[in-house]
Amino acid sequence: MGRIIGILSGKGGVGKTTTVANVGTALASYFKKSVIIVDCNITTSHLSLYLGMYYSPVTLNQVLTGKAKIQEAIYDYHVPGLRVIPASLSLKDLRGVDVSRLKKVIKKLSDEADIVLLDGAPGMGREAMATIRASDEVLFISTPFVPSTMDIIKSHQVALEIGVKPIGIMLNMVGKERYELSVDEVEQLAELPIVISVPMDKNVLRSLALKTPVVLFDPASPASRQFFELAGQMIGEKYIPDTFLTRLMRFFGMIK
């Protein structure tokens, strides 16, 4: 049975979709896991755009209207082991979509992959709530500022009421400026652990322009290393950066 992990945020623009694309890619490319990433942000779908997928005949929208099966909406990405279920980019495909069916259709993916990552809508609307209910676990994405942290508090409370296990918070776009909240301050406010801090990294913006995850565009960049680290934490495996020292250690059989 595969794990279904919702990636959620209180506000938009904090890097939720970027996280789904990069962690999913890291799990498949580095850790050799079977991964499906799903765009559950039906009204403002972006995941396929991040990956350069502009045409998908069958999407999650058709599944939620009962016109297609979930397996028909799965597309192979060019990274072996990574598959994508996009939401439609067309406004007309919002007609008849029933997000209350999301949990039922997502559960059918538990035998299809080791890890299923759900890119949820921001906030606490119907789409976000449906994503929480469809998840076994949730990871919250926040920036080191009060507004996004306060929204995580609300989302955390809802997840606990529904009975979904919180993994913790990924703190994103960290610049280590004096006016930012510290890790301790975010943990105290949200009453959740910070599992990883991803630094502000221009390579992420460059990779978005090229429609490719930053872990592929520049695996050694500061943000990429943290995405790899987060992927390893999720499955209890260690990420070892590819450096001259690690290549030498592999040569002498000191590490795998």
Image (cartoon, grey):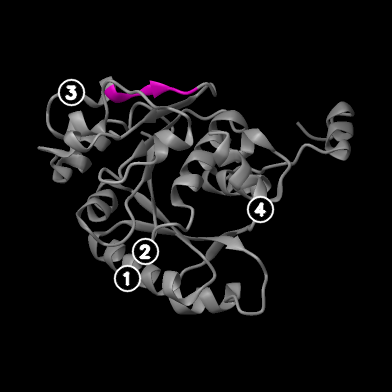
Q: Nearer the viewer, mark 4 or mark 1?
A: 4
Q: Is residue 75 magenta?
A: yes
- Tell me the CA gap for discs 1 and 2: 8 Å
Q: Are marks 1 and 2 in contact (CB under 8 Å)?
A: yes
User: Which circle marks residue 154 in the picture?
Assistant: 1
Image point 34% across, 39% down: which residue? 39
Quarter the C terminus occupies: top right
Could you tell which of marks 4 and 1 lies nearer the N-terminus? Answer: 1
Could you tell which of marks 1 and 2 lies nearer the N-terminus? Answer: 2
Q: Amino acid at mark 1?
A: Lys
Label 2 element class: loop
Q: Amino acid at mark 3?
A: Ala
Tag count in the figure? 4
* In the image, residue 71 above or below residue 197: above
Image point 22% across, 59% down: which residue? 125
Residue named by callout 4: 201
Q: Nearer the viewer, mark 1 or mark 2?
A: 2
Q: Are marks 1 and 3 in contact (CB under 8 Å)?
A: no
